Image: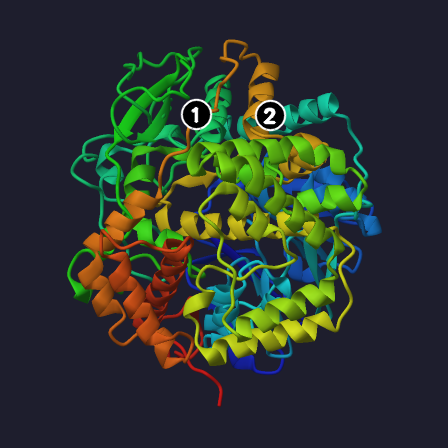
Amino acid sequence: MRWLTGWSGSPGTGDPALAAVRPLAGTALWSGPNPLWAVGDWRPDEIRLVTLRPGGPATVRPGPDPADPADRDSPATLRLAVIGHCGATDTELAAGLAAARGGAVRHLTGWPGSYTVVLRAGLRSTVLLTDLAGLQQVFHTPWSGGTAYATAALPLADLVGAPLDPDHLAAVLATPEAPEVLGTGTPYAGVHRVPPGHTLGIRSGRPYTAGYEPETPPGRWTREEAPAVRELTRALLEAVRCRVRTAGPEVPAARAATDGPDAPDGPDAPGGRPAQRGLPRARLGVDLSYGTASTTVALLAAAVPIGPATAAARPGTPLPALRTGAVKGSWARTPTAPRPTAPESLAAVTLGESERPTLAVDAPRLRHVVLPPALPYAELAGPPAGLPAGPLTDEPGAALLTADALGARFRAGGTDHLTGYGARHVLDGHPARLADLIRLGRSRELLAPLAALAGADRATAGALTGTVRTPVTVLRAAHRLARAGYADALDDLALALTLRRTPEPGPTAGAGSAAALAWAVPGPAARWLSDQALAGVAQRLRTAARGGAPTELPGARRARLALHRHAAAYRTLAQAGEQRGQRLHAPFLDNQVVRAARLLPEEVRLQPGARHALLHAVLTGAGRTDLPADWGRGPRPDRTGPARTGLRQAADALVELFERPLLAEAGLIDHAAVRESLARAATPEAALPPGTLAGLADLIATELWLRRVAARRHGSCWTGLPPAQRRALTRPT
């Protein structure tokens, strides 16, 4: 895992012993009383520093300059660090720093790529910027009279010796998309999260946050459909191009077979599988198994020439001949010998059978690799003694249950591996946006979405449900949300949690949309929480109801929060499955792509099959005019069957895991109810209510994460501090 850290406010002045505190294996990007460190396997092109002194031009460097000590900066000196994958040129970085002298920072988030920005003015002021989706997160905590910050929460918890916060874990399990309950907390007590789309400013050691994105008045869109689609095409093309043109080097076969996840101070997952040993890792890889989004990214990447290798994944590794790769099916192409002017191939990875998938469109540069499908919970099916082993992520997440499968998939991909994650949340309209249309007096635009839901339910639940019940149920729920007040909605949810009357989504598409039409909804794991945990969450909801109501429309708010949750889940996935020296990319989560998608008229995003139609238009605008008219409209794969099969195969390990769970020790779950549900889910003939598998996955992942935290209770990301011993989970008395 790679992360940045630093502090502001001269925290070492009170205790001289603290002046020696520094992160393990960290590289100082600038020194002085307010230092900045980069930790992990950063590539040289991922660290770019810009300095602007009074009366002189801005200088851009790929790393720290020993001849330019930052501890001698004058109050008018500006320093900018852009860390991550940023497509801006040196000229654009210099111009951006010059424009930031007046205090504006939003323009620093408009470049292609996914990156973190740190801006320092003199020796007393530091500003960090998050992204809009919530992938590039920033955390902070008080420390030694100042404020320490990092792009990961675990290192800050190590720094201050923070215990785990059971109340936050209860809030995440009960209401994962309710900021009224989550606040700015993290799983570590005293470590705070900066909301997406905000800046963290630290002046004289005191932190403050502020949003940098202007609020759009409800119902106002700045573009018609055609210009908005052109802007989306431009943004997505730039996001893909900037990654392809700076792809890392090919990894030799010996290293590709042994690399595992690079987790912070945690045990590595097992090395390469026999099926992958002896195969070098291509420079560039793409997913080609997950619908139109990954296919779109693969086709866009295949049309871009790959630039020279930026740097070896490890120092001293020689750069091989240019080559890329993609993972997919049996229609594999043998790559030709690389030539200076010939485009490289891309490794396209597909999970499933060897036949050619219906969404794939032929591209000469794609070299397809098919991997056997893997079941969730596969890593738990081994001996119970091995349960704590595996990658330790910053926060719990469902990706921990598929870490082995993720590792195999990404090992087969490229040194830079592109995915389609985030497309559904960025492009599709959230069901709650139906209530926004009613509030804006545009009820006639509900006809097409309601007709689509009715057609889907008619095919699965019969003519009566699809023709009558679905439209009526969804329309009533939309009108109910359009009339509902924010405070009343939070009070109702608090009462429902207290009485354990959490609504469950129905088995049909219409019932699921109706259940999502609310200001806030409980998470799928809420049904197994203890009375004490639910009472604490309900109290937070009632307190938030007494505050001010948000200015956003309920649908727009729910869509934004769902995107934040999905980006956080992808962040955990990358930490669990990314290999050493590898970079996973999600172009749909870039700032410029998110902003372009917000320009789309809401009536376009709510149309049936809107995402597929939009991606079809993007590819057409990029020159792919050979796509069939019904491209992307096939049936979605069934994920319930594999999840239940994997859970059944890991039943013995799960019984061991929940014999004495840490969640029960902290009073967070109803232990007997969880064990009963696990036994029922492992029974093939037992019927499960909707949401059961998702809720159990959240509980299992959280318990597994707690076990791994407990296994490293003596570990630390820092040197110069006494070792802190903490229990995995404690509840204040």
In the rendered image, residue 164, in percent from the top left (x then y), is placed at 46, 75
What amino acid type should be assigned to the residue bearing mark 2? Leu
What amino acid type should be assigned to the residue bearing mark 1? Gly
Q: Nearer the viewer, residue 518 or 624?
A: 518
- In the picture, measured across the screen, residue 505 lies left or right of residue 378, that is right
- 636 up-or-down from 641: above or below: above
Mark 2 surroundings: few (<14), some (14-19) or many (≥20) residues within 10 A: many
Q: Give the quarter of the image for residue 31.
A: bottom right
Q: Secondary structure at mark 2?
A: helix
Q: Which residue is mark 1?
A: 634
- 715 up-or-down from 474: above or below: below
- 248 up-or-down from 66: above or below: above
In the rendered image, residue 317, in percent from the top left (x then y), is placed at 33, 37
Q: Give the quarter of the image for residue 206.
A: bottom right
Q: Secondary structure at mark 1?
A: loop
Which label belongs to residue 290?
A: none
User: Mark 2 or mark 1: which is in front?
Assistant: 1
Q: Nearer the viewer, residue 580 or 640?
A: 640
In the rendered image, residue 644, in percent from the top left (x then y), is placed at 28, 50
Q: Of callouts 2 and 1, which one flags the residue occurring earlier in the amino acid sequence?
A: 2
What residue is rendered at 54% in x and 38% in y?
424
- In the picture, measured across the screen, residue 198 lies left or right of residue 609, that is right
Q: Nearer the viewer, residue 618 or 303?
A: 618
Q: Which residue is mark 2?
A: 614
What residue is rendered at 35% in x and 38% in y?
638
